[in-house]
Image: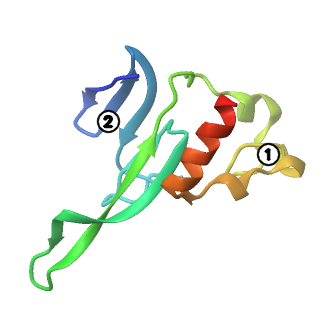
């Protein structure tokens, strides 16, 4: 799948996978949209390999900044309204699964080795 980007506004970019909307990047970030110095990226399947970035750094202290890789899935669809239909009080506010089936343990940065193993297991 080839990713492309479309500028929706000065503060939002639409992420397309094979021409279909599969995510977005926007600012301000945070649940309350209160983090004006941050971006939020929605729609990715996994985050992996938090690295030191060789390009961006603190020029005074020469401290490298970070970069992260995000993996998108072409099966992603817009219109996730489950949390509205079921009511927010019945769902986890972080992962949007029913509170008794919370999946927050899966909301973490993974290593490339973990993702490779997952891909191999899917293909078996």
The residue shown at (36%, 42%) is 26
Where residue 70 appears, as percent x and y from the top left, is 43, 45
Viewer-proximal residue, 35 or 54? 54
- Residue 32, visible in the rendered structure: no
Residue that numbered label 1 is attached to: 91
Q: Is residue 34 left or right of residue 75?
A: left
Q: Is residue 76 above or below residue 18?
A: below
Mark 2, Cα crowd under 10 Å, few <14 / some 14-19 / many 20+, is some
Viewer-proximal residue, 115 or 98? 115
> Distance from label 1 to label 2 (Cα)?
27 Å
Residue that numbered label 2 is attached to: 12
The residue shown at (77%, 28%) is 85
Q: Residue furthest top?
A: 19
Q: Residue furthest left?
A: 60
Q: Is residue 80 left or right of residue 4?
A: right
Where residue 24 appears, as percent x and y from the top left, is 40, 34
Q: Is residue 10 left or right of residue 31?
A: left
Viewer-proximal residue, 118 or 70? 118
Res. 71 mark: none
Looking at the picture, the colour scheme in use is rainbow
Where residue 121 appears, as percent x and y from the top left, is 68, 38
Q: Is residue 19 above or below residue 30?
A: above
On-image quarter of the N terminus: top left
The residue shown at (51%, 36%) is 43
The residue shown at (56%, 25%) is 76
The picture quadrant where one finds residue 7 is: top left
Helix or strand or loop: what does disc 1 sit on? loop
Q: Tell which circle, 1 or 2, labels the residue nearer the N-terminal end.
A: 2
Q: Residue furthest right?
A: 100
């Amino acid at each position: 799948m080839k990713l492309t980007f479309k500028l929706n506004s000065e503060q939002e970019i639409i992420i397309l996978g094979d021409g279909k909307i599969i995510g977005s990047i926007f600012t301000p970030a945070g649940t309350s949209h209160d983090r004006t110095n941050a971006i939020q990226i929605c729609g990715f399947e996994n985050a992996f390999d938090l690295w030191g970035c060789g390009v961006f750094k603190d020029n005074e202290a020469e401290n490298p900044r970070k970069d992260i890789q995000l993996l998108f899935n072409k099966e992603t669809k817009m219109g996730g309204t489950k949390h509205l239909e079921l009511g927010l009080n019945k769902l986890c506010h972080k992962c949007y699964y029913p509170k008794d089936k919370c999946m927050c343990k899966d909301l973490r940065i993974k290593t490339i080795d973990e993702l490779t193993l997952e891909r191999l297991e899917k293909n078996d």
